[in-house]
Amino acid sequence: MSVKDEINEIVDVHLTGERTARVRRDAARIEELAYHRFEGRDYELFEEQLFKEVQPMVVGMLRSGKLARLAQVHSERQGRKFFVHPDDLRLLKSSAEARDTLMADVVVQALRKLQRDLQAGRGWSADHSGPRGASCLTSYFITLCVWMFRREYVEWAQNRVKWVQMHAVYDFTEGVANEAGIGGLLAATDYTVDAEVFGTDFEEILDEQAPETQAVVRLTVMGFGGTEIADKLHISHGAVRNRLTRFRSALWDAARDKRIWIPAELNTRKAPRLAEEAAA
């Protein structure tokens, strides 16, 4: 199924009436707005209505990961590399705040492009002669959102990285580590950390993680408890646990691949798989 067909299906689910009737309605509306060159109060009202109409669609596409996937398909067709981090996809699925923030950025940029295109005589047309005929204006606008997603996602992700750097700056040194929470991070009870454990390899592995995971790990190593971390980062206690669990798994995977050395004493859990990994 093409990107256009997927978008049309989403719009058809959310909007009432047949597509051909929507196209006629949109053509009349655009013709009316053209008299004022797509400016003024009437155009502002049109933008407000369009924003309200597409908001639940774009939020739903962010939650399901469909917007990111379609944007990646579009980027590949344009010859551009585009990668969405799995942790970001998980965050967008679980966090309404994250979805609303990114949705607003994407839709606002799409509105700006739509206005520029209409003023230049480009963009949506009721006379489109593709194999399935013209799409309604809403479908065309969702397509613009797909096009805008790449740039807005990158900026959103970079801002989160900057936020992590401001909120969780930490110097990973052996002395400080033994005074803080490295034992708690790796589920140990009482162990003195060796320099071989807490070196540049650890930092490299941490740098590979999503920004929120980095923040949770750094604050854990600094000695903060789960509840304190959740309060500081404005996330749930469950999210803190999940990110620590994922990072522990990444560390044990790295140990198995000989990227980092972790003494068996740093793991006190009795599960056979973890004991085997610790021994490695």
Image (tube, helix red, strand yellow):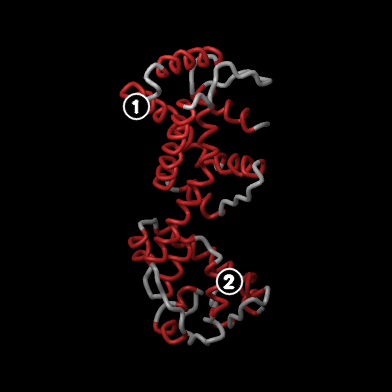
Name the residue nearer the viewer: 187 or 164.
Answer: 164
Discs 2, 1 touching: Cβ within 8 Å: no
Q: Position of residue 74 (x, y in %)?
A: 62, 40
Residue at 51%, 40% in the rendered image:
148
* Horizontal arrangement in the rendering, residue 95 relative to residue 127 (left or right): left
Amino acid at dot 2: Leu
Secondary structure found at label 2: helix
Instruction: Give the tally of numbered discs.
Output: 2
Of label 2 and label 1, which has the lower sequence position? 1
Residue closest to the eye, 142 or 63 = 142
Is 190 on the left-hand or right-hand side of 129? Answer: left
Based on the displayed image, in which of its 4 quarters is residue 56 positioned?
top left
Relative height, residue 223 to residue 232 (above, below): below
Q: Looking at the picture, how far across and down is residue 157, in whole percent?
A: 47, 54
Classify 10 Å Cα crowding around label 1: few (below 14), some (14-19), many (20 and above): few
Q: Residues within 10 Å of mark 2 (few under 14, many from 20)?
A: many
Front residue of this view, candidates 27 and 8: 27
Residue underneath mark 1: 44
Q: Quadrant of the C terminus?
A: bottom right
Coordinates of residue 28 in the picture (x, y in percent): 46, 13
Q: Residue at x 67, y 74 (%)?
A: 256
- Residue 17: assigned label: none
Q: Which residue is mark 2?
A: 251
Residue drawn at 43 percent across, 16 percent down: 29
Residue 165 in the image: above or below residue 130: below
Residue 136 position within the rendered picture, expressed as x and y whole percent measured from the top left = 53, 21
Three-letter code, disc 1: Glu
